Image (tube, rainbow, N blue to C red):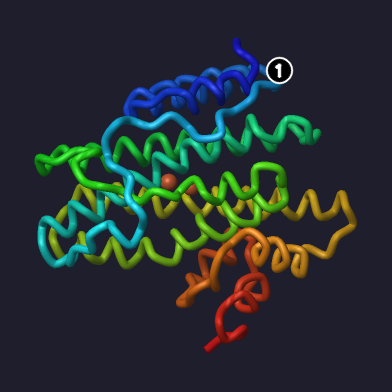
Amino acid sequence: MLPLAEMAVTVLTTANGRDKTAISREFASVWRDARAAGVVPDIGHAAPPDMPARPDQPALLAPRDVPLRKTGSPEGRIALLHAVAHIELNAVDLHWDIIARFTDVEMPIGFYDDWVQAADEESKHFNLMCDCLEAVGSHYGALPAHAGMWQAAEDTKDDLYGRLAVVPMVLEARGLDVTPGMIKIFKQAKSHDAVAALETIYAEEVHHVAYGSKWFNYLCGRLDQDPTPFFHALVRKYFHGDLRPPFNEEKRAEAGIPPDFYWPLTKDGRPT
Ligand SMILES: [Fe+2]
Ligand SMILES: [Fe+2]
């Protein structure tokens, strides 16, 4: 089997979304089979691209130029599914990128098990969103999407601590806050397949946040750093703006993120 970092770069340099996720899922299953057989596969070294390869469509626009649509209409709900598909495709690349990007930092094999698992799940999430879009006559690429989703990866490309703080522990934790509201929208519209897909995403995203928290705390222990102020400093350095309540305190707790991690980073600095 290929060293894991080379698998990661293969996924990152594949442009088409369905192809990217197919390769990603295939590599994840090869990895899991090896691990189940008691093998500790080679991680290797391979340079990830600055930006992952992406399809020609969707057009990527500055966030302020992406049209806002009301979710009360079918078009609005298609736009919402499209936005989630775009987030999931970025997430596939983010998880493979953390695998390839930081191979100079010696990490236990479980670090790689976790991110391979997360990348596999994101690949499934992207496919689920594409299936939902295609079932209503649309597809990923039919609408414009946010540019700048790779910004957090770029900003933290030299800092594994910063990467863990910002990507799983801020951005993916934000997903836990907003997904229940999306599920409600599709329940009201009686879009059963979208509800089922979003419920799968919601259940699995908790693990990705938990992986972030677990390895962030692990690395803080290595440096003898107090995780809470260190987290605050990293988020202030790499994340632009305040964190915005309301927070899903229960799911955040389940993922190992206590309130004193996020409340001090809000505008008011404390629960409102
Ligand atoms: Fe996801
Ligand atoms: Fe995720």
Percent across and percent down for residue 251 are: 51, 64
* 62 relative to 102 in the view: left or right: left
* 203 relative to 71 in the view: left or right: right
* 65 relative to 245 in the view: left or right: left
Residue at point 75% right, 55% down?
217
Spot the residue most to the bottom: 272
Q: Quadrant of the N terminus?
A: top right
Residue at point 61% right, 72% down?
262
Q: Nearer the viewer, residue 205 or 87?
A: 87
Q: Secondary structure at mark 1?
A: loop
2 in relation to 200, above or below:
above
Residue at point 59% right, 66% down?
253
Q: Quadrant of residue 72?
A: bottom left
Percent across and percent down for residue 24 are: 46, 26
199 in relation to 30, above or below:
below
Residue at point 55% right, 38% down?
95
Q: Would you name the residue on which mark 1 appears? A: 42
Percent across and percent down for residue 135 are: 13, 40
